[in-house]
Image (cartoon, rainbow, N blue to C red):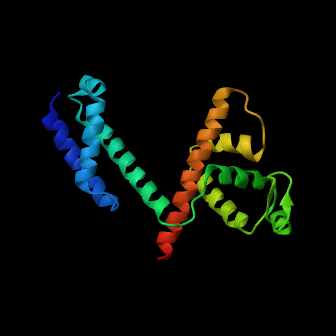
Amino acid sequence: MNWEKVIEISRKVAGELARKWPIVEADDVHQEIMLHMMEQRSHLEKKVGDYDFLRQVAWRAAKSYASREQMQKDLADDQYFYTPDEVRSTLKSFVYTDEEIGEMIGKKDDLSRCRITDNITSARIDAGAALRKLKPEYRDAVTRAYIYGLPPTSPGEAKTAQRAVDALSTAMNAHIRSKARAGR
């Protein structure tokens, strides 16, 4: 494997990504890319001459690292953070209209088995915005499993619904972070 070419690609990608994601330093991104390339070298050796493929792998590793760093920062910044359980409860509330939710605030809901607070309104808004960002397969899975409450038809469908909720909670958290950054 031509490691000089890999190092050159990873340095370029690291610099580009660090300019787009101020949360990370180019040297740290470069190290993460090189670590990923070393771990995947048996697969990469088959495509060693494919510059575009190596660049794509480097970008994936770089974005994954930057995303993890952003997630860690978001968890530590004392701002609200939706958990997958809260997302499931929010999705279950979609069977109600806004007027019905308004009438239920302060009362216990039999469906979600919790007291309805006015936080449900903002959670529903964040979920609605984040649902539009999910890929259609995930959007269909959460709609079927958590909004309509239909049982999964297979273990694969159940796993897809779980992954979809995780993706939705990530998207909801990104949505509230972007609102907070825009408000500053």
130 lies above or below 153: below
Residue at the bottom extreme of this rendering: 184
**Could you tell me residue 48's position as x and y percent?**
22, 28
Displayed quadrant of residue 93: bottom right
104 lies above or below 37: below
**Could you tell me residue 59's position as x and y percent?**
32, 44
Asked whether the viewer can see residue 15, the reply is no
Nearest to the observer: residue 125 or residue 67: 67
Residue plotted at (35% across, 60% down)? 23
Displayed quadrant of residue 90: bottom right
Residue plotted at (17% across, 41% down)? 7
**Could you tell me residue 16's position as x and y percent?**
26, 54
Asked whether the viewer can see residue 62, the reply is yes
Q: Tell me: 158 left or right of 65.
A: right
Nearest to the observer: residue 81 or residue 4: 81
Q: Tell me: 12 left or right of 21.
A: left
The N terminus lies in which quarter of the figure?
top left
Residue plotted at (24% across, 47% down)? 30
